[in-house]
Image (tube, rainbow, N blue to C red):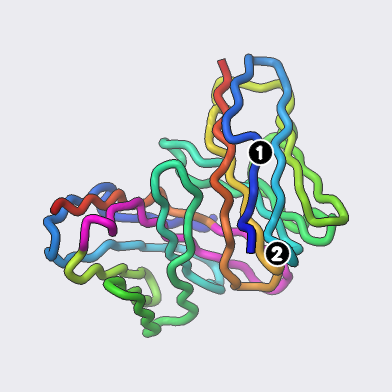
Amino acid sequence: EDQVTQSPEALRLQEGESSSLNCSYTVSGLRGLFWYRQDPGKGPEFLFTLYSAGEEKEKERLKATLTKKESFLHITAPKPEDSATYLCAVQAGVGGSNYKLTFGKGTLLTVNP
Amino acid sequence: KAGVTQTPRYLIKTRGQQVTLSCSPISGHRSVSWYQQTPGQGLQFLFEYFSETQRNKGNFPGRFSGRQFSNSRSEMNVSTLELGDSALYLCASSLGLTNEKLFFGSGTQLSVL
């Protein structure tokens, strides 16, 4: 069974204090690893997709990296508006056109001004 | 372009009742997925529909069912509601290709009393 574990569960930072969120996974045949951001009262919003170990993607203050066992979401000089729950998800399986994501429970990030 | 629309936004039901939730995907998207989100379990996959056919199903009891119409709109139904069914139900749409990002609606918050 596919498993995704995110740590820490919650993280509180001061504005400008860089840090990283971790997503470790156990899957059979990784097809893609996704990062989403979820604000209170809203659905998850797509951030990145990573497909293979060594891949990196950046967007503003966020950078996602992938190894064979885990992914990191690095946040550089965060601002209060970066406060949200960050979700990691994997899509796994061999063949077929089915689309099923297995999500971690998320990291609640709070950035204080 | 309008996003994914879910109705109703909030719903209160009592044990034993049944409920139907509705999802209108982004125009042109043919795949609709449903997820259940709870504080304890996080996001869990319910099922996915593509061109009116169920393509994948999660590990939920048969009380949870869904369907998709020819215009890609989707409904999910939960019969014989239990207290543990209280959750945020999220719908997501995509073109239906492998490894592509999902666009989520804001969800329907279901409370079972």
Q: At x 75% / y 42%, what residue is drawn? A: B75
Quadrant holding the N terminus of chain A: bottom right
Dot 2 surroundings within 10 Å: few (below 14), some, or many (20 or more)?
A: many
Residue B113, compared with residue A110, is above or below; it is: above
Compare residues B112 and B80 and report the one nearer the observer.
B112
User: B22 or B16, which lies in front?
Assistant: B22
Instruction: Give the alpha-carbon distance from disc 1 to disc 2, as whole Å.
Output: 25 Å
Three-letter code for the amino acid on which mark 1 is drawn: Thr
Residue pictured at 33% horizontal, 52% vertical: A84
- Is B45 a magenta residue? no
Question: Which of the 4 quarters of the picture holds residue B26?
Answer: bottom right
Q: Chain of mark 2?
A: A
**A18 relative to B22 in the view: left or right:** left
| Front-lying residue, B26 or B93 | B26
In this rendering, the answer to whether B112 lies above or below A46 is above
Q: Secondary structure at mark 2?
A: loop
- What residue appears at the point 50 percent right and 46 percent down from the top-left corner? B43
Disc 1 on helix, strand or loop? strand
Callout 2 amino acid: Asn
The residue where tag 2 is placed is A98
Q: Is residue A81 left or right of residue B66?
A: left
Residue A84 in the magenta stretch? The answer is yes
Q: How far from the left and from the top, in percent, is residue B78?
A: 71, 30
* Direction from residue B107 to residue A13 in the image, left or right: left
Q: Are marks 1 and 2 on the same chain?
A: no
The residue that disc 1 covers is B7
* Disc 1 crowd, CA 10 A, few/some/many (<14, 14-19, 20+): some
Q: Chain of mark 1?
A: B
Q: Which residues are magenta?
A: A79-101
**Up-down: is B36 above or below A107?**
above
* Image x and y of residue A56, in percent: 36, 82
